Amino acid sequence: MKNKEVKRCLFCNKKLSTTSQYRSTTKYCEVHKHKARIKIDYKMYLKELNNLPKSFISWLVGFYEGEGNVGTAKKRMIYFQITQKDISPLKIIKKTLKIGKIKLEKRNNSFIHRYLINRSGYIFALLETFIPFMKSIIKIKQVKKILHQKYA
């Protein structure tokens, strides 16, 4: 009789389901799969952000403090957004950060553009990069509240 090796979650050591279609590559239980993805995204993107010019980060933080916000939607989904009538600064941000999407929305008989990021790991890395450049006390509190969720 063969002795099968039991695969376990790298976070909680819980035995992994043998019915999973990805059982040969799965390293995390269903509960921790999302946390692992956030951690990987965060580490990878933080390295990329550290290579950006400080002048761009400073400009982006100023833009965020004036026209952006970060928050949570249903089921603790985190989002980062900047809203603007003119699409050109949003295109620069998207091209430089290499993440996110730009949406066109109708609001009060006019159109606005919304730059949106909804990958938690990327948002955590971006916000941690922002903190040293931030001036608005209200925005700093907002950012710290979101970053607290990273460790919860």
Image (spheres, rainbow, N blue to C red):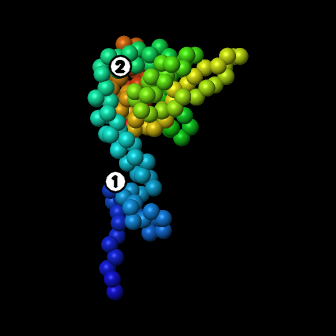
Type of amino acid under label 2: Phe
Q: Which residue is mark 2?
A: 56
Instruction: Give residue 45's quadrant in the image.
Output: top left
How many numbered marks have been drawn onto this rendered protein structure?
A: 2
Res. 11 mark:
1
Q: Nearer the viewer, residue 140 or 81?
A: 81
Q: Quick check: 81 left or right of 12?
A: right
Q: Nearer the viewer, residue 68 or 87?
A: 87
Is residue 14 shown above or below 140?
below
Q: Quick check: 91 left or right of 97?
A: right
Is residue 59 shown above or below 23?
above
Mark 2 secondary-structure assignment: helix
Residue at the bottom extreme, as displayed? 1
For marks 2 and 1, give the one nearer the viewer.
2
Q: Residues within 10 Å of mark 1 (few under 14, many from 20)?
A: some
Instruction: Give residue 54's quadrant in the image.
Output: top left
